[in-house]
């Protein structure tokens, strides 16, 4: 038995299969107390506000396309995961889940203007984690206040709303009235039991990402060309973040980070003190026409927050604006109390006369902030693949990073900024698909053969041979019973690089030859999943 598998994880990275059906969905299609699954062989169209209500769960298969109908006010379309509801949307690097406008042909990256915004709503996830506002639960922004399923907040900081991974949210932000627009991804009271990573918000009319309280931790977030703030938090948000990336439009957009502490009351506790490591924020351009709004960080309303090992560059406005009131608690108080920390960051390319208020400059100096060119590979906002925020070999960001907490969440890296050598946006983002950024996911060719041998007694994954290798090697495995088998290749950041084997296999021994000519040198992990057995091994590609 011989199988040939061609894994071209290159330019055609979005679902290109013929869709079996286009299905309009409403809240009634996600029954309370039931489990609903959306599959990649259908296209789903949100008809109004579609709720995953308390007691319901929604699973979205990798590669699925979800579209929102146009409409304003109460006719806005959005997917809303209510408190007690759960979403399991797990895309992959080569099969992202796409949320976009009904008018968007996802097989054609050129069908809509790059600046198309406000064509539908967005995605809203609500939970029971705590807020610092009174009375402790609040109607979420973007939903009519009369809707009880729009409430968020509570007292469970470990609340679990599910998994949201490898998703691209495009062209949203419709206005429901009185300037109340829907963010790309809104998180209200979302707890730390929720997994959110590898999420892109592209060209939303309002904010890219906004947190209202809560404790959710997030990694690998992309906020690109959004009409208002890139990352906004309020009401005592206290989550962890790493590898956050911003690119601002040359003419439209507000702060890269608008960070508020609380509203009612402003000095409510717990304070907003998220801890963010390895961000790269690129503004509208030091001499853009967006100078009045193009500020790196606007920190106010008694907000704290901690930025470590990050790069802030190419902004027309100032670097950081910290609230300083004549009386009462404010963000300057949080700075002086150690709740607001800016450490081991690189700042460069500002059109404004000042980087920070006078009282904050001593803090920046004392905490190893540097004013120097980070030497990124390239900054661009057009389809020339020139937006490349990785570091040049001579970049000062390869040095000077501070220690990262080794707490099981943060990835240990030794550079400043969201990117080192690896372009983790490749494959799943619109930025990569549209040619704004390079798209560098590798092509791996694999051929699988069944080996004539007795049926094995146990599931076995052998070390590849040769190892180290360049560029070809062979992986052998054996399964003792018929069943579904996956052999997946990952890089050391846990990102899926290629699927080497997937499908039903009869009991027996198998050999998979792979050609990794297009992979970068380094260590990779291959994982065999067969039934309830999961086995891992490492291999090293030398070049």
Image: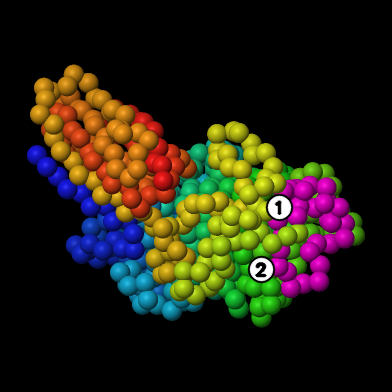
Q: Which residue shows up at 52% across the image and 55% down it?
A: 221
Q: Is residue 348 above or below residue 399?
A: below
Indicate left or right for 460 with 271 as reference.
left
Quarter containing the N terminus: top left
Residue with the mark numbered 1: 345
Closer to the camera in the image, 378 or 32: 378
Q: Residue 238, percent across and down?
A: 64, 45
Q: Residues within 10 Å of mark 1 (few under 14, many from 20)?
A: many
Q: Which region is colored magenta?
A: 341-370
Q: Is residue 125 above or below residue 282?
A: above
Mark 1 to mark 2 CA distance (whole Å): 14 Å
Q: Residue 335, percent across and down?
A: 81, 49
Residue with the mark numbered 2: 314
Closer to the camera in the image, 511 or 225: 511
When asked about the image quadrant of residue 112, the answer is bottom left
Q: Which mark is residue 289?
A: none
- Is 533 a magenta residue? no
Q: Is residue 65 visible?
A: no
When asked about the image quadrant of residue 315, the answer is bottom right
Indicate left or right for 84 with 305 as reference.
left
Sequence-first disc among 1 and 2: 2
Q: Which residue shows up at 48% across the image and 55% down it?
A: 423
Q: Which residue shows up at 56% across the image and 66% down it?
A: 378
Indicate left or right for 74 with 28 as reference.
right
Q: Which residue shows up at 52% across the image and 63% down it?
A: 388
Q: Residues within 10 Å of mark 2 (few under 14, many from 20)?
A: many
Label 1: which secondary element: loop
Q: Residue furthest top?
A: 457
Q: Is residue 265 above or below residue 461?
A: below
Label 2: which secondary element: strand
Q: Residue 455, percent across and down?
A: 13, 23
């Amino acid at each position: 038995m011989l199988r040939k598998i061609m894994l071209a994880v290159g330019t055609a990275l979005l679902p290109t299969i013929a869709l079996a059906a286009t299905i309009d969905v409403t809240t009634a299609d996600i029954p309370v107390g039931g489990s609903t699954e959306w599959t990649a062989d259908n296209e789903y169209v949100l008809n109004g506000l579609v709720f995953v209500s308390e007691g319901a769960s929604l699973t979205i298969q990798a590669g699925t396309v979800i579209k929102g109908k146009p409409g304003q006010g109460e006719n806005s379309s959005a997917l809303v995961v209510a408190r007690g509801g759960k979403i399991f949307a797990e895309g992959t690097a080569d099969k992202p889940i796409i949320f976009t406008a009904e008018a968007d042909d996802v097989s054609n990256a050129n069908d809509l203007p790059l600046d198309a915004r406000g064509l539908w709503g967005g995605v809203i996830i609500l939970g029971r984690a705590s807020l610092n506002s009174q009375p402790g639960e609040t109607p979420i922004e973007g939903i009519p206040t009369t809707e009880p399923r729009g409430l968020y907040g509570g007292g469970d900081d470990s609340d679990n709303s599910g998994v949201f991974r490898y998703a691209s949210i495009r062209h949203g932000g419709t206005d429901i009235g009185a300037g109340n627009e829907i963010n790309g991804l809104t998180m209200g009271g979302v707890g730390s039991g929720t997994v959110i990573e590898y999420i892109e918000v592209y060209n939303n009319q309002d904010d890219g990402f906004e947190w209202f309280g809560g404790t959710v931790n997030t990694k690998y977030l992309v906020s690109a060309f959004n009409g208002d703030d890139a990352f906004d938090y309020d009401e005592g948000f206290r989550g962890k973040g790493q590898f956050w990336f911003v690119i601002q439009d040359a003419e439209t957009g507000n702060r890269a980070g608008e960070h508020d502490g609380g509203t009612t009351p402003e000095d409510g506790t717990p304070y907003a003190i998220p801890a963010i490591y390895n961000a790269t924020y690129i503004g509208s351009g030091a001499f853009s026409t967006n100078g009045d709004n193009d500020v790196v960080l606007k920190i106010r309303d008694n907000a704290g927050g901690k930025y470590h090992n990050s790069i802030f560059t190419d902004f027309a406005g100032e670097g950081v604006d910290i609230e300083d009131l004549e009386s009462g608690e404010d963000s300057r108080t949080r700075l002086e109390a150690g709740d607001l920390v800016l450490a081991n960051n690189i700042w460069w390319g500002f059109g404004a006369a000042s980087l920070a208020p006078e009282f904050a400059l001593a803090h920046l100096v004392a905490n190893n902030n540097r004013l120097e060119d980070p030497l990124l590979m390239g900054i661009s906002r057009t389809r020339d693949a020139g937006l490349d925020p990785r570091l040049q070999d001579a970049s000062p960001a390869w040095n000077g990073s501070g220690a990262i907490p080794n707490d099981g969440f943060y990835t240990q890296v030794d550079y400043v900024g969201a990117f080192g050598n690896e372009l983790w946006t490749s494959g799943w983002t619109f930025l990569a698909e549209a040619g704004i950024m390079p798209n560098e996911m590798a092509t791996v060719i694999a051929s699988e053969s069944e080996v004539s041998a007795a049926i094995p007694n146990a599931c076995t994954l052998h070390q590849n041979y040769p190892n180290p290798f360049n560029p070809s090697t062979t992986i052998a495995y054996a399964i003792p019973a018929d069943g579904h088998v996956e052999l997946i290749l990952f890089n050391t950041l846990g990102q899926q690089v290629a699927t080497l084997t997937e499908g039903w296999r009869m009991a027996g021994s198998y050999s998979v030859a792979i050609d990794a000519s297009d992979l970068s040198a380094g260590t990779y992990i291959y994982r065999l999943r067969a039934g309830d057995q999961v086995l891992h091994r490492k291999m090293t590609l030398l070049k």
